[in-house]
Amino acid sequence: MPSNAILSQQTRFLIQKLGTNGTAKTITAITAAKPAVVTSTAHGLATGDVVTLAAIVGMTQLNGQQFMVKVTAANTFELVGSDATGYTTYTSGGTATPFTFVESNEHKSYSASPGQASDIDKTTMISTAKEFGVGLSDTGTFDVELNYVEADLAQIEMKLGLLDSSERWFKIIKRNLAHTGFRGSVRSLSESGAVDGIFTGSLSIRISGNKFETA
């Protein structure tokens, strides 16, 4: 039976550029579904884009939220990971404004470490074996090995993220065009050099919330 493994070469890595957004798309309808489907005439978005929603009348629960989108047609797109089945019926208005991303040219590998819950020791003196409860869980980390290049636009944004501690969106686009997106904060950006070597670095991101994926 042939393998379904996907080559990791040509994987792209992008980081949100804070303070720079694309043109707002006018919304004319939203379905109360899972996922919610947005109608926006000639929206021009691409699968994997990330938008923030605003000024929606009726289905106000979506205002201020951010979603990765999956394009379904020239005039519609899904809000990946959304569930609007219990939301107020859409009435009118609204915009979906896409974020701007900067693409890395120097990433070499990455690893995504899912979060895990801590163990709470509940063992007592009458226990016959160790007893544990499930504690709070974290959302994990995302680590990238890269060539350290000061002029690389993505690394400039990484440094800004380290300084301002602001959350940003990050995206991975695989060879098969599957997209993974998540919000996170830059924890560290290291630099190292050696004789007969190049400058290399390591980026560590603390993931906040869920990861979103599109096939």
Image (cartoon, helix red, strand yellow):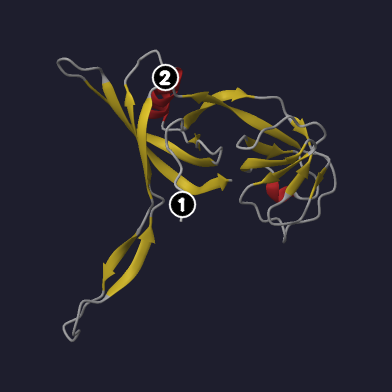
Q: Identify the residue position indicated by label 1 in the image.
A: 2
The residue at the point 81 percent across, 55 percent down is 89
The residue at the point 70 percent across, 46 percent down is 78
Classify 74 as above or below 129: above
Q: Is residue 64 visible?
A: no
Foreground residue, 4 or 95? 4
Q: Residue 98 location, x and y as percent?
A: 65, 31
Q: Are marks 2 and 1 in contact (CB under 8 Å)?
A: no
Q: Residue 166 location, x and y as percent?
A: 46, 33
Q: Identify the residue position indicated by label 2 in the image.
A: 156
The residue at the point 56 percent across, 37 percent down is 177
Q: Secondary structure at mark 1?
A: loop
Q: What amino acid type is highlighted by mark number 2?
A: Ile
Which quarter of the figure has residue 57? top right
The outermost residue toward the top is 151
Q: Residue 102 location, x and y as percent?
A: 51, 23
Locate residue 41 relative to residue 84 in the image: left or right.
Answer: right
Q: Secondary structure at mark 2?
A: helix
Q: Earlier in the sequence, mark 2 or mark 1?
A: 1
Locate residue 21 relative to residue 42 in the image: left or right.
Answer: left
The residue at the point 37 percent across, 61 percent down is 136
Classify 149 as above or below 117: above
Q: How many marks?
A: 2
Locate residue 35 relative to residue 150 in the image: left or right.
Answer: right
Q: What amino acid type is highlighted by mark number 1?
A: Pro
Mark 2 and mark 1: Cα distance apart in space:
42 Å
Alpha-carbon neighbours of circle 2 within 10 Å: few (<14), some, or many (≥20)?
some
Q: Residue 184 location, x and y as percent?
A: 45, 39
Foreground residue, 117 or 144? 144
Front position among marks 2 and 1: 1
